[in-house]
Amino acid sequence: MRVEGSIRFIILSEIVFPILLLMFGIYHGVMQVLYRAGIIKADSFLGIDYYQGLTLHGVINAIVFTTFFAVAFGNGVVMYALKKPLRPAVQWIAWILMVGGTLMAAWAMFTKRATVLYTFYPPLIGHWTFYIGAVLLVVGSLLPFFFDWIPNTIAWKRENPDQKIPLAVFGVMVNHTLWTIMIIPVAIEILFQLFPLSVGLVDEINPLLARTLFWFFGHPVVYFWLLPAYVMLYTMLPKIASEKGKLYSDPAGRLAFVLFLLFSLPVGLHHQFTEPGISNVWKLIHAIFTFCVALPSLITAFTVAASLEYTAKAEDPSVRNSKFYWWTRLPYLRLEGDKWLFSYLFAGLVLFFFGGITGIVNASYNLNLTVHNTAYVPGHFHTTVGGLVLLSFLGMSLYMVSKLRGTDVKFKGLAALAPYFWMQGMFMFSYAMMVGGALEGFPRRTNAGLTYLNPDSPLYRPEWVGYAQLSVVGGALLGIGFVLFLIAFFGTLFAPKVREATIEFPIAQAYHDAPTPVLNNLKGWTVAAVVLAVLSYIPPLYDVTQRGVFHNSPAYNEQYPIPLKQLQQTQSQSDEKLSLKEER
Ligand code: HAS
């Protein structure tokens, strides 16, 4: 499908702009391993301090890059699959809000006015531009959904009453529906707690309420990152693997997306198992729902494997009767046509296999008490969001740029190798983080090179040194993988145009394609998802406003990590004792 003018510019820039920012984001990831291993023994480097770098790393990689990509990919998929144009006015307003909001937040982070990490937990508080910037980014990301994708899908359904919405569009619509719902709690946190505190309208807020509202958003958001990758796995991976490739089951894909809509929301308390002030019963209920939300990923694992098996056997009938040998027929490192893209999705899948297992460990209430706040948790999420999600987004960004620019993919060999460097680096990094975290309690979010891994420090912990060093080797491989990708990306972006600019995707047909009327209409499922989310959050939210508030809680003094009030009380008690003694 030809694409020109402002829509082409907008989609292209929604890919290029966040990749430029991602260069800072990933640079700060490499810096993290250097700080933590004590290779950089300082609290800042080139004017950016440890926690500022960690904030940039988390916000750019996990919030900005993913949101821009979800919009660019959604725009492309909806336009291509429904063959309907997008509205330039809607797209421009969305673009201005997203780019403007990101620049506001970036200014606050780069000028050290918002060193609050990507979770922005109070009492950490940032400049108001950080919060308003985030709100603008999010509002902008919703406009295409409400004013382009929904009207276009309704129009398409009217014109094609007997057909199912294309699965890729279905996945994109589920994802943005989920996004719309999950934004409500975090918007309440930002607009009614953090922003007023930041501009001085209020003096104090309830931090436990803020954290609970954050995680009401903070876990579903991981599925907002994941679902575009799942759209690619279901609808595109088989076709990338072979012209004859087919998706094994279209209904399985729809069921997985609907289950994500239902179960992504009532799970946030699994990030708060260790919080006092929330009843254990509700933590357990959220733990059970967390196991439910793993189900659609298990469905995906089997369906994707079946699609690959079908595809390999269709491509090479000589392996038709083999149980496992067909694995050797997949294009792991091939450069014909678009086959280079296979390596991104495959390397991502392998990493996600471990991301999933470690997620289940996290979710298991009692095991979580061992791994929470240790390096195990970043070990887990780097094999999910830093694995399948990042690799599929990078690969698809390169693919879309070549189509939208009308250029050939340049340095294809490097492009196809990059994900394997990334995968290997991530294995080393995550292994070090997970084992160090789970078995030895190596902490997360800590500039350990200054303290625990510094032999001159009284806090020195020699048993963590090996893990930190291994994570540096992993970090270096990750850096190399990303540089290889950048060479191919910018080579392709600036290559001479060889054909007209198009938007197109390698969409596979389904092998099993039974009608699925129950799954087709998202209205009922959306209502059910909202009801489940509200029911699962009313009691914990009530809890945090009652049991989570400590009135007159004493302030802390930087010099004494003991509550001031307690110090004063101790002081006055000893004064009293002294005067009693003197009286006697
Ligand atoms: Fe998670 C913490 C539980 C999935 C991201 N997670 C995080 C954090 C992030 C994150 C960023 O219960 C840290 C937040 C922070 O800063 O504190 N997570 C889970 C569970 C799942 C899960 C149960 N997480 C994700 C995904 C993420 C992500 C996806 C990003 C995209 N997570 C937790 C918990 C915590 C947590 C606790 C809090 C920990 C704490 O204490 O702080 C599940 O959805 C996972 C289900 C996945 C599967 C895997 C299916 C496998 C597939 C691959 C098949 C491969 C094939 C190829 C076919 C069941 C689809 C062949 C493979 C070969 C090996 C050859």
Image: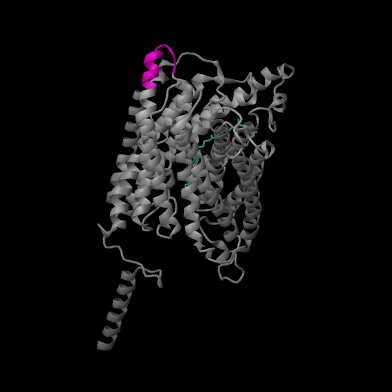
* Span of residues in magenta: 153-164
Residue 536 appears at what percent x and percent y?
A: 34, 37
- Residue 156 within the magenta-colored segment of the rendering: yes
Say which of 406 and 160 sits in front: 406
| Residue located 32% across and 31% down the image | 531
Residue 260 appears at what percent x and percent y?
A: 44, 31
Residue 45 appears at what percent x and percent y?
A: 55, 63
| Residue located 56% across and 71% down the image | 458
Say which of 98 and 238 sits in front: 98
Q: Is residue 412 visible?
A: yes
Q: Indicate left or right for 48 with 342 as reference.
A: left
Classify 86 as above or below 271: above
Residue reaching furthest right?
318
Say which of 304 and 492 sits in front: 492
Classify 99 as above or below 84: below
Q: Quadrant of residue 388?
A: top right
Q: Quadrant of the C terminus?
A: bottom left
